[in-house]
Amino acid sequence: MTLNKAMLIGRLGKDPEVRFTKSGQPVASFSMATDRTYKDAQGARQKETEWHNIVVFGKLADFVQNYLKKGREVYLEGRIQTRDWTDKENLKHYKTEIVAESIRFVGPRPEGASGPSGEDAGPPRSSKPRPANAVSEGPPPDDAYVEDDIPF
C-alpha cells in the first residue's frame, strides 16, 4: 500500500496564474508559504519559511482564479508530483509541485478581499464541505502539461 497526500496551511505568495490546456481546461498555479518555528542551539527562536509550488485543475482552478489573491491564508489537500522536461538547450529540469484537490479558506478575509458569502468563518464546522469555500476536482486530463513543455 502507498500514500501520496499533502496537507498544507499557508499563505499565497503571489496571485494565481491561469493557463489553459489544449482541450480548454483551466490550470492555475501559485506559490504558497508555510512557516516553521524552532529554537536554535543558543535558545533563540527562529522562523523558517518553506515555499511550495501549487497547481490546480478544472473547476478548482476557476475558484482559485476568482477568489484567491496574494497573502490569502488557505488550507489545501493534494498530492505531491515531480515533473521533468528538457529545455531547448537539452538541459534536464525538475519541478516538484502539490497538485491541489481541495482548498478551504482559513482565517479572516483580508482587507478589501472579495469572495463567496460566509467565507471568512474559517473551516466548516460540520463534516460536509461548503461548496463556496471547498472545491474538489478529479484527476487532471492527459493533456494537462502540454503548453510548450514549459513549467509554470
Image (spheres, rainbow, N blue to C red):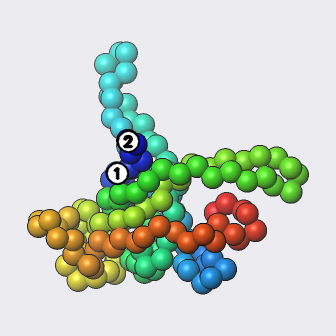
Q: Is residue 65 visible?
A: no
Q: Nearer the viewer, mark 1 or mark 2?
A: 2
Circle 1 residue: 7
What quarter of the picture does the N terminus occupy?
top left
Q: Is residue 122 visible?
A: yes
| Image coords of residue 91 (percent x, y) | 82, 47
What quarter of the picture does the C terminus occupy?
bottom right
Q: Give the vertical position of 2 relative to 116 (above or below).
A: above
- Residue drawn at 79 percent across, 52 percent down: 86
Tell me: 130 left or right of 42.
Answer: left
Circle 2 residue: 1
Farthest residue, direction left: 126
Helix, strand or loop under label 2: loop
Which amino acid is tagged 1? Met
Q: Give the vertical position of 3 relative to 24 (above or below).
A: above
Q: Residue 30 or 144: which is nearer the viewer?
A: 144
Farthest residue, direction front: 1
How far separated are the C-alphas under marks 1 and 2? 19 Å
| Image coords of residue 148 (percent x, y) | 76, 68
Helix, strand or loop under label 1: strand
Q: Residue 133 or 141: which is nearer the viewer?
A: 141
Tell me: 86 left or right of 61.
Answer: right
- Residue drawn at 33 percent across, 35 percent down: 37
Q: Quadrant of residue 147?
A: bottom right
Which amino acid is tagged 2? Met
- Residue drawn at 21 percent across, 71 percent down: 129
Q: Residue 130 or 69: which is nearer the viewer?
A: 130
Counting residues from the start of the chain, the first of labels 1 and 2 encountered is 2
- Residue drawn at 38 percent across, 45 percent down: 3
Mark number displayed over residue 43? none
